[in-house]
Image (tube, grey):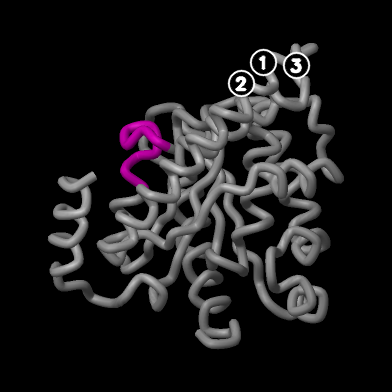
Amino acid sequence: MKTLREEMEGLSTLRTKQVLKDATRIALVGEIFVRRDDFSRQHLVEKLARKGVVVRTAPVTEWLHYTDYCIAQGLNGPVSLRKRLAMQVKKMVMRKDERLIGRLLALSGFHDGRHIQVDHLVSRGSSLLHPQMTGEAILTISPALTEVGDSAHGVISIGPFGCMPCRIAESILTYRLVEEKENFSLDKGDFWAANKDRLPLPFLAIESDGNPFPQLVETRLESLLLSANRLKESLPGA
């Protein structure tokens, strides 16, 4: 932890073009491998960074908390009392370590300090997809609806070509994003209830097969960035 603190304090001394909270922010969600692998996502994070856009990739800890949630809720089969108690102890230790590491990472100025709230994500997402349909779909739908317009100015969902969970998430988000936004927002529900038809909620789904993105995807990406900048300028306090 001492080394981590020293490194984060060192990062905080770096010159930046703008502070994190003032930048246009995009949330990257979707299939856990593709969203984390630079080659699979075609170095999307770096491309957008060169345009002055900050991309927040959904962390691996989201999946860890989700799998623990599925076990604790018995979504993958019956769970004994002993295993439930063991899961609770494990969860307490993980949360404690996560909060400590988060505080240290925040010293750099590049970490927003937010924690994954799987209970909220699954509870809200259950209105659109039954929790027993476990996997990436609900972990794409709920974070996208929660973050866009709140902590992010746009959302990109990325997954492998032909991935069924990703296509399920894409179809639901394409048709329900605007109507459902107010129900997923952590602290701006009233705002989005009043403004959901006035402001854009930028969303783009991308399927990756290892090849460079086609021109159509690149064009849609540019359109997403324009909408994200427009949303950023329109939000209160922007």
Name the spot of residue 233 as percent of width and height, x first.
52, 84
Q: Residue at x 39, y 52 (%)?
A: 102
Of 76 and 213, nearer the camera is 76
Identity of the amino acid at label 2? Answer: Ala
Numbered disc 1: secondary structure: helix
Q: CA distance from mark 2 to mark 1?
A: 5 Å
User: Relative to 137, is 21 on the left or the right?
Assistant: left
Of 153 and 224, nearer the camera is 153
Numbered disc 2: secondary structure: helix
What residue does disc 2 label?
86
Task: Determine if the magenta segment contains residue 38.
Answer: yes
User: Relative to 174, is 143 on the left or the right?
Assistant: left
What residue does disc 1 label?
83
Q: Residue at x 60, y 59 (%)?
A: 147
User: For residue 70, which numbered disc appears in the image?
Assistant: none
Q: Quadrant of residue 132?
A: top right
Q: Give yes or no for contact between labels 3 and 1 (Cβ–Cβ under 8 Å).
A: yes
Of 49 and 64, nearer the camera is 64
Residue 55 vs 66, above or below: the answer is below
Q: Where does the magenta region start and end?
A: 36-44
Q: Give yes or no for contact between labels 2 and 1 (Cβ–Cβ under 8 Å).
A: yes
Q: CA distance from mark 3 to mark 1?
A: 5 Å
Name the spot of residue 8 as percent of width and height, x first.
21, 57
Task: Determine if the magenta segment contains residue 208.
Answer: no
What residue does disc 3 label?
81
Q: Residue at x 74, y 41 (%)?
A: 122
Q: Which image quarter is the N terminus in?
A: top left
Q: CA distance from mark 3 to mark 2?
A: 9 Å
